[in-house]
Image (spheres, grey):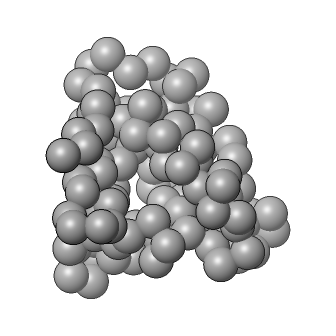
Amino acid sequence: MSRFVHPDLQDVSLSAVLHALADPVRRKILKSLVTDKSCDGRGKSCAAAAPPDVPKATLSNHFSVLRSAGLVHAEKQGVEVIHRIRCEEVDRRFPGLLSAVLSNDDPEDGG
């Protein structure tokens, strides 16, 4: 069984979070996961959370960066990896950061 490492957010630096949030693809993934959390919160598979135009070869790297920055939690369920955003934990560590970044209508994000 594959297990993922999820850092304690007290051990995550602001620069690591900002690095993860700097990439438009990763912001799109997080926006997708925020939408899931506000709906049913069950999480999304890699393919469902990622923009359709992103090559599969780069997706694992994007999700790895998001996990390392403490922004998402991943869990293997059968053949899929389900991701959930860690909004409450991130907001306790860096108040308002996620909502400020993800509510921004950045043209690079397509929104």
Above or below residue 3? Residue 49 is below
Residue 103 appears in the rendering? no
Residue at image position (80%, 63%) is 108
- Quarter of the figure with the C terminus: bottom right
Residue 105 pos. (x, y %): 69, 68
Q: Picture quarter containing residue 107?
A: bottom right
Residue 66 pos. (x, y %): 47, 43
Residue at image position (66%, 52%) is 58
User: Relative to the observer, which residue lies in front, 62 or 31?
Assistant: 62
User: Relative to the observer, which residue lies in front, 90 or 44?
Assistant: 44
Residue at image position (29%, 31%) is 5
Above or below residue 2? Residue 27 is below
Residue at image position (48%, 40%) is 64
Q: Picture quarter containing residue 109?
A: bottom right
Q: Is 47 on the left or on the right of 37, as rendered?
A: right
- Across the whole image, how many numbered discs are drawn on residues? 0
Above or below residue 91? Residue 8 is above
Residue 50 pos. (x, y %): 55, 69
Above or below residue 39? Residue 70 is above
Instruction: Specify the farthest residue to the right.
Output: 107
Residue 60 pos. (x, y %): 54, 50
Residue 49 appears in the rendering? yes
